[in-house]
Amino acid sequence: MGFRSVMRARHPGRTLVEIAEGQGLDATQYDLVRAALDRDPEIRAVYSIGGGNIATLRAFADAGRECAVFVAHDLDQDNTRLLREHRLSAVLHHDLRHDLREACHLVMRAHGALPPAGPTLPSAIQVVTPYNMPPATVTG
């Protein structure tokens, strides 16, 4: 909702096309994106808060269209690969472990297991691009 409200306030003439029914599933996402691309020849950027990013890119390719800017969420396995391949422009990532640790500390403080603390800051949002990704982990 924050993205939509900022876009509408700062760029009122720009049309936003929402696809909310895909539920992050590749098969569903592909069909929905492909239909949106067929309806609107002006779509050339994606902001994805969920999964199905591989399917979204495949829909652009199958339609013979370029996705000029693609911003996704969470540095999962698919998005990491897509960033390394320069198929995503950026990923907005936050540290879920930090959030969980803070939630546990809050519960522990409520039960007296930890001393009171001052206000806690929300976890930082990291903007990860193909150019500032952490090095690939080598296993073996």
Image: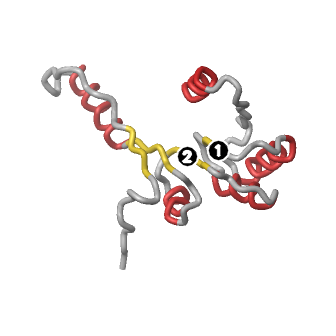
Label 1: state its secondary structure.
strand
Neighbour tally class for label 1: few under 14, some 14-19, many 20 plus, Cα within 10 Å:
many
40 or 30, nearer to the observer:
40
Neighbour tally class for label 2: few under 14, some 14-19, many 20 plus, Cα within 10 Å:
many
Task: Give the vertical position of 116 relative to 136 (above or below).
Answer: above
Q: Is residue 78 left or right of residue 98?
A: right
24 or 83, nearer to the observer:
83
* Contact, mark 1 vs mark 2 (Cβ under 8 Å): yes
Residue at image point 18% right, 20% down: 118
Task: Write down the residue under mark 1.
Answer: 46
Residue at image point 43% right, 51% down: 128
- The outermost residue toward the bottom is 140
Q: Is residue 114 left or right of residue 33?
A: left
The answer to which image quadrant residue 35 occupies is top right
Task: Write down the residue under mark 2.
Answer: 72
Please tell me the numbered disc located at residue 115: none
- Disc 1 versus disc 2: distance between alpha carbons? 8 Å
Label 2: state its secondary structure.
strand
Residue 30 percent coordinates (x, y): 76, 52
Instruction: Name the kind of residue labelled 1 in the image.
Output: Val
Q: Nearer the viewer, mark 1 or mark 2?
A: 1
Residue at image point 82% right, 45% down: 41
Query: Which numbered disc, 1 or 2, marks the residue that appears first in the sequence?
Result: 1
Residue at image point 80% right, 60% down: 64
The answer to which image quadrant residue 3 occupies is top right
User: Considering the image in quadrants, where does the C terminus appear?
Assistant: bottom left
Instruction: Name the kind of residue labelled 2 in the image.
Output: Ala
